[in-house]
Amino acid sequence: METSSKPSLSQQLLGWGVALALAVFVGMALARTLGEVRYQPTSDEGYYLKYMRDVGEQGLGAFPDLFRYYLGDARHHIFPPPSRVGFAVVSAAWGVATEASLPALSKLSLASHLLLILAVYGFASRWFGVARALLATALVATSTLCLGLARHALTDSFITLSQFLVLALFVEYVRAPRSLARTLAFGAAFTFAILTKEIAVLLAVPLAAWAAVERWQAGRDVPVARTLIVLAAPVVATILVWVVAAGSPILLYRVMRIVLLSPATNDYAIRYGSGGWFRYPVDELLMSPTATLTGIAAVAIALWRWSRREYLSVPVCLSLVYVGQLLCLAPFTKNLRYVTLLEVPLRVLAVLLLWELFAAERSRTRLAMCCAAVALLCWTSWSDYQLIWLKFHGYDPITALLVGVRELVPMTPGN
């Protein structure tokens, strides 16, 4: 399910060619619909646009004023804070290169999803070989949630890309923990991910758990002290960057306090984001039933096989990230946008499960059956995308929208 022989140069070139063609196809299909996006400039989008413009016009010196602006009016506190330094800087550069507008932010989201497609293929081909990597990439590329968010002037596609790089580079680090290059690459990616969205710090929990499993169960030489430093150092670095950006530790503390406490007084969050940890799997099933069911089954099987001493390194890592994020994010407001990263392990594991069911024997007939099964999941995911995001003009993938789309409650297109 995990190991594979090293592909030949021709196989690698063919694989990258197919992955690039897939990204181009998805990009063209999504770009055609950008003109239909309904923006909400008085919501989160408006704040991201302000950060984009101010940093683009004033440079990094704009951040202290943005922190003071955010703290200056309680009405700002339910919206994205200026501590999202990573996205603000990249979006500002994007705005300078193109234009500082909501459509430009949509194009940045689209570019982020296309880069995610290529990143998934690049790492999956190292872990599972070209064939499985292409199938997994196709299923991630057609994720109903990712496709919808790739059209919006929000940060979620960008965040998903940055968090996936954290996950993938940690796998690479654990495989060669004494490599300075891999250590620095992970540290930089983790720092940037936290600077892009604070809650990314919680990824350290399942990643640390997997590193412990690799050391004490799989027998891999993963240094404990070094790994703890590798996970902790980005947090320290992030805090230092935030202090500089805010211009004062006190201002930073006040903003972080608002970030943690404001959901408890946010009517929208209370009404649409309350509930237990199970909200995420339920909403995932409402968003894309077939792919989600297959992915959840794959998570359960990977963990069950592990319990029976059939340990498979990367599948267990992906499963722990999925389960760990559900548990770590349980106390917070629930919104599928906040856990878009989980689409990657779900869909990669779904492909690995189908591959083992159909193609493990390497016969052409069974390989064709596996490809057909993945193609069916891609088609149903794309159909769900067209229903939720195009027909019903979905914006925020909350449960209220999804149950309406699935006709569990009355709803009409465009509402």
Image (tube, rainbow, N blue to C red):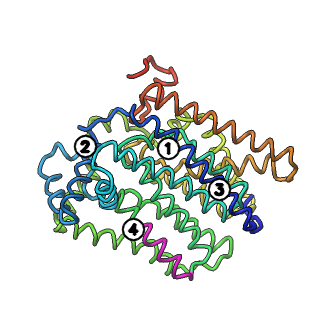
Give me the C-alpha separation between circle 4 and circle 1.
23 Å
User: Is residue 101 shown left or right of residue 125?
Assistant: left
Tell me, for residue 46, which label it has, or none: 2
Q: Earlier in the sequence, mark 3 or mark 4?
A: 3
Choose the circle earlier in sequence order: 3 or 1: 3
- Crowding at label 3, few (<14), some or many (≥20) Cα neighbours within 10 Å? few
Task: Classify the position of the N terminus by image quarter.
Answer: bottom right
Residue 197 vs residue 321: left or right?
Answer: left
Q: Residue at x 26, y 45 (%)?
A: 79
- Can residue 281 be seen at all in this image of the molecule? yes
Query: How far apart are the two marked residues, 2 and 4, measured between alpha carbons?
Result: 25 Å
Give me the residue at 41% from left, 73% from top.
Answer: 232
- Per the model, the C-alpha gap separating discs 2 and 3 is 38 Å
The residue positioned 13% from the left and 47% from the top of the image is: 73
Type of amino acid under label 4: Thr
- Residue highlighted by disc 4: 191
In this picture, is 349 found above or below 39?
below
Depth-wise, is mark 2 or mark 3 nearer the camera?
A: 3
Q: Look at the numbered discs 3 and 1 and tell me whether their residues touch, using CB distance below 8 Å.
A: no
Which amino acid type is marked by label 2? Gly
Region rendered in magenta: 178-190
Residue flagged by tag 3: what amino acid is it? Gly
